[in-house]
Image: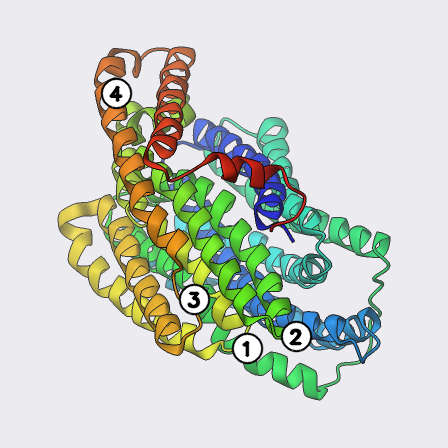
Amino acid sequence: MNLTRALGSIGGLTLASRVLGLVRDSLFVRFVGASFASDAFLVAFRLPNLFRALFAEGAFSAAFIPMFNRKVADKDGPGLPAGVAFAEDALSVLLPVLIVMTIIVEIFAWPVTYAMSGKFNGISNDQFAFAVELSRFTFPYLLFISLVSLLGGILNSLHKFWVNAAAPILLNLTLIAALLFFHNHDPYLTARNQAIAVSVAGLLQLLWLMHACWRSGVKLRLKLPRLSPDVKKLMALIWPAAAGAGAVQINLVVSTALAASLLPAGSVTYIYTADRVNQLPLGLIGIGLGTVLLPLISRQLGAGEDKAAMDSQNRGMELALLLTLPATVALVLCGGPIVAALFEHGKFTAQDTFFTAQALSAFSIGLPSYILVKVLTPGYYARSDTRTPVRYATISMVVNLVLNLAFIVPLKHMGPPLATALASTVNVFLLYRTLRVRGHFEPDQRLLHRAWRLGAAALAMGGILWLLQGLLTPYLHGSWMIRTGAMLALVAAGGFVYAVATFVLGAFTRDDLAFLRRKRAP
């Protein structure tokens, strides 16, 4: 497999999804603004997203994909039919659990929403009842997206990465359609319609993956729950993987709950909107790398190709640094024009832009860490070690909580994002150190040679952006077209300087360009 080409395939679709996500968020803040209605929806949407990250996409994929791959790759076994039989056994247990969990949360939505928000800050009982109502509308999304995760794991293992990567596009298109055709002058009604659209989107994603599996010859049958030895092993791996895969999401939930309970109305929206911008490079780079690396390393280790697995992780680290470092510098220095161009219209004011840009700068400090977690954890999951990441994720969550409590009063809406960034950095350090100690990862000479050069190129780009931002300041508060033009000029100038600097410093060479054109890695 060509790692770069596979990442490009996933990255291109993820880019489309993230761009649509920004369109969705831009329309949302235009019609709803930074208000309690927007905070209530975002807390309700965070609830199924938390469980999705913990038990669906993150934990389930981390445990399921290596086991499925080993069955498919077994030369002495039946191959794909054995993998499909394992998937059916997993589905027979997963589906009833999801149905029961959904019913429980629907019944106990009040205490669950209270735990997620601390009943917000200074709101009435009627307002809190509205937030509970939105949580009930959004939570069925977990049921659908968990089944999507099972089917997506199968398709990823068959190297059909693009199908699963395209699924989030349906979510964004559905929410955009709801905003365009069902928005209302009352922001509360618009927020309610968005909550309903979330679960509708989950159902559409499930139908898309079911069709793709059918086209690939994978037809899962529903059967009575059966705790086979493989399913028991899968369940034993899922629980520790849940916290390990969802550490960032858990940290974000803690940040959201503290912001909702301690900060003024609108603060949750500032943090969420900043995180959405920060998620653009994370989705393009981190999620793509994690999606490709896990089945690749699992298959290499299953075939006894330990050296190839080490090389794959080195190249994954190199790609992460190449793409992440300039994004980090750009978001820290140029958050203002980026947020203004994307969101400052309708009910989203210049003051909202200023506060959101501050939160974005704090989030972006941790961008390399968020992505490196996606590169390092496959080194554990491919070896069926889901317990070590959970220990480090737990430490990370404790650090996040302590820093949140320390930062939230003096730094307000900047405190939770900064705490999340620093906690993620702690997680990366622990994951990296343990892989090194165990001999499962050793940075090769190529990575060491290029890492500092990539950092220097990103700093050179940052210097140019800093100078240009001062020149473009008068254009950052004009019409939407003028603000967008100023932002695109900054992005183009930064990209050009970074590209030139990487070649001048030797961080990227002509041989790399030739490699990108090859069908397979050498």
Amino acid type at circle 4 is Gln
Label drawn at residue 438: none
Residue under label 3: 111
Which of marks 2 and 3 precedes in the sequence? 2
Residue 480 versus residue 455: which sits nearer the camera? 455
Residue under label 1: 384
For the point 51% across and 39% down, the residue is: 511
Which of marks 2 and 4 precedes in the sequence? 2
Which of marks 4 and 3 precedes in the sequence? 3
- Alpha carbon distance from label 3 to label 1: 35 Å
Q: Do the residues bearing badges 4 and 2 touch, measured as CB atoms within 8 Å?
A: no
Provide residue 307's location: percent of width, then percent of height: 53, 68
Label drawn at residue 469: 4
Which of marks 1 and 3 precedes in the sequence? 3
Using a 10 Å C-alpha cutoff, classify the residue at mark 1 as few (fewer than 14 neighbours), some (14 to 19) or many (20 or more).
Answer: some
For the point 59% across and 35% down, the residue is: 16
- Alpha carbon distance from label 1 to label 4: 48 Å
